[in-house]
Image (cartoon, grey):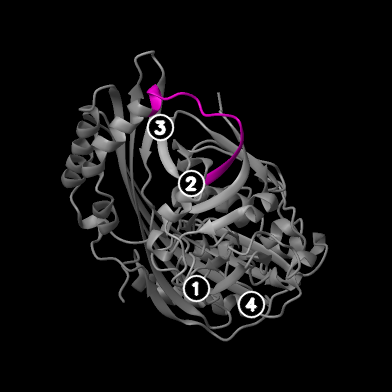
Amino acid sequence: MNFLFPNKENLDPILREIIDLSKKLGVDYSDLRYGFYKSETINVRDNLVEAIDYDENFGVGIRVLVNGGWGFSSTAVLDKANLLETLETAIDIAKASSELRVEKVCWEPQVAQVGTWCSSIKEDPFKVSREEKMNLLLDSTSNALQQDGCFRATASIFSGEELKWFLSSEGSDITQRIIRTSPDLMAWGKASNGNVRTRNHQTPPLTCGFENIRSADLVGNAARVGSEAVERAEAPFGPQGKFDLILDPANLALTIHETIGHATELDRACGWEADFAGTSFLKVSDLDNLKYGSKWVNVQGDRTLPNGQATLGWDDDGVKTNEFPIIEKGIFRGFASTRDSCYLEKTKGLGKACSHADSWSNIPILRIPNVSLKPSEGESAPSKNDLIKDVKKGILIQGRGSWSIDQQRYNFQFGGDAFWEIRNGEVCGMFSDVTYRGITTDFWNSCDGVSSKDYWEPQGVRNCGKGQPSQQGQQTHGASWSLFRNIDVGDAN
């Protein structure tokens, strides 16, 4: 694969010389990432193109390990003199870190990794004209606005490309290309009494091409989204009390992200990460012991998931990506870890390949991988309708809404985007607002059914924040429609 890095041919000998020089200067380990990032977002409101944002940036980040301490520095000025200065700065920082560290960085060596990897795409989003994209969005908002009571509609298309070239003192030489796309459509509806509510067509952001935008069918779904926004505005507030819940994949994606994804980051569990959104209720001693959920709950971490947002060939430590169990039949089995943190899990090796930097200008940190609730298997696997028929008094929730969770990922509250009453196995009228709340392990132990693979969807998040300076991450959280019993529900009024 021939990836179009800016000026790569001229930089190639210089960057290799930087790695060679770092070894001569006595570092224990060094790597560099030459990154090129490109993004385009087109936003439409009603019948107007509101904004077209386009950005390109590239540069080199250099990381070194000296006497058990990390040092990192980056630059966008890619001449030899400046790159040498950047290396010297990284070494100076590493030496200072080694004097202040509590313990040495544990860094298991690995054999050189050499290869290329590219997202699977059918249609390059940057080769689709802006005119076509704008017309698609304008047709979508127009269809939504034709529904009585729908008074506003917005739509957007995001396209992103990331090129990464990784070199290390161990001899690794890796090039990767990641393409991400994400469509969005939202409508505002107004009831006869003046109440206003929204409805979102929450299609998954994925690492694939413009085919993701086409399959979302924003134009075809716009009328439904507009009419459901009005229906929600006209609907009564939801009830309060204990109810069974049927949750769709888009709603579960955020719940998985917050109550499992962040909770099972090894750095949070060990107190390495506390400053940005807290630690975790989990302890290393909970491995293979804690009953995280019911027998229905099987959760997988997977950086090889086809079209997953956190999917690539190697992580930013140069470790080959993999999949691993997080929860098996309700029992907690594994943390997300990196090459320099996996020893905390009392395991040898290179970790779970969860190291990621959102830019060439940032140091890699531990990030959530793709984390998904596995569907039920076999002939007895229930359908969505089977789950609904098994509910006498409940609520069906679609999509994401408001959310809140404590600093240990234990006590939470989640909303949604659309809500319907379930009575005696039948879906009835709509509610305007519902929230559900609980304790992480109680909630997952209340799971009493997960539908089959026919209902599994790769939903996810595009804006997971972590670290200081803050970095943005993207993860896919797949799930099937699932049933939870006796959950505490409020009306969110």
Please tell me whether mark 1 or mark 2 is closer to you in this view: 2
Does the magenta run of residues contain 51? no
Q: Position of residue 144 (x, y in %)?
A: 24, 32
Three-letter amino acid code at disc 2?
Asn
- Tell me how far mark 1 sits from mark 3, CA to CA: 48 Å
Q: Position of residue 84 (x, y in %)?
A: 55, 66
Three-letter amino acid code at disc 1?
Trp
Residue 48 left/right relative to 82: left
Residue occupying the far front of the picture: 424
Q: Residue at x 51, y 65 (%)?
A: 374
Three-letter amino acid code at disc 3?
Gly
Front residue (pair 69, 208): 208
Neighbour class for label 1 at 10 Å: few (<14), some, many (≥20)? many
The earlier-in-sequence mark between 1 and 2 is: 2
The earlier-in-sequence mark between 4 and 3 is: 4
Return the residue at label 1: 314
Q: Which mark is residue 429?
A: 3
- Tell me how far mark 4 sits from mark 2, CA to CA: 33 Å
Neighbour class for label 3 at 10 Å: few (<14), some, many (≥20)? some
Front residue (pair 438, 276): 438
Up the image or down, 108 lies above or below 435; here it is below
